[in-house]
Image (cartoon, rainbow, N blue to C red):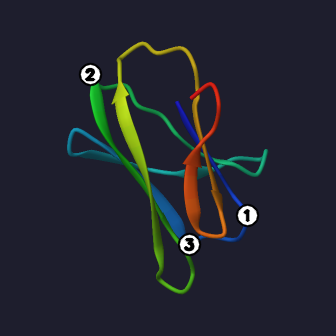
Amino acid sequence: MFSVSVDEEIRGGTLTLNGASAPLMHNIDGAHWAKWDGSDASGRIEVVFPDGAVTVCEIGYVTHGMLEVQAFAVVDRQCSQLDGG
């Protein structure tokens, strides 16, 4: 699972790993989530703002079956991975 908290409204976002994409879903907790059921991979999360600007969160190597949520925060349109991710 991947979680992205954003400090402003977004138009949408996409998780892409090994060339396969999944949309970010807005959760009741305010974060945006995506689930990955594929094989070991690396990739990125693209967050799209209402004005068309895009912020990219780079994802290092993740393995199938990782139990920890990979958490990211976008603040002032800059992405960082949170501790534990």
Q: Position of residue 81 (x, y in %)?
A: 56, 41
29 versus 11 height, above or below: above
Say the numbered circle drawn on residue 39: 2
Residue placed under numbered mark 1 in the picture: 7
State the residue at coordinates (68%, 71%). 9
Q: Quadrant of the C terminus?
A: top right
Q: Residue 36 in the image: x percent, y percent?
A: 41, 31
Q: Is residue 66 left or right of residue 85?
A: left
Residue type of the residue flagged with mark 1: Asp
Element at label 2:
loop
Tell me the crowding category of disc 3: few under 14, some 14 to 19, or many 20 or more residues within 10 angstroms, Cα based: few
Q: Which mark is residue 11?
A: 3
| Front position among marks 2 and 1 | 1
Q: CA distance from mark 3 to mark 2?
A: 28 Å
Q: Quadrant of residue 68?
A: top right
Query: What secondary structure is found at the residue carrying circle 1?
Result: loop
**First-in-chain label (3 vs 2):** 3
Query: N-terminal of the two: label 2 or label 1?
Result: 1
Helix, strand or loop status at disc 3: loop
Q: Residue furthest bottom?
A: 51
In the image, 9 versus 73, the foreground residue is 73
Name the quadrant containing residue 75: bottom right
Classify residue 6 by image quadrant.
bottom right
Where does the image place residue 55, in percent across and percent down from the top left? 48, 66
CA gap between label 1 and label 3 equals 13 Å
Tell me the kind of residue under disc 2.
Ser
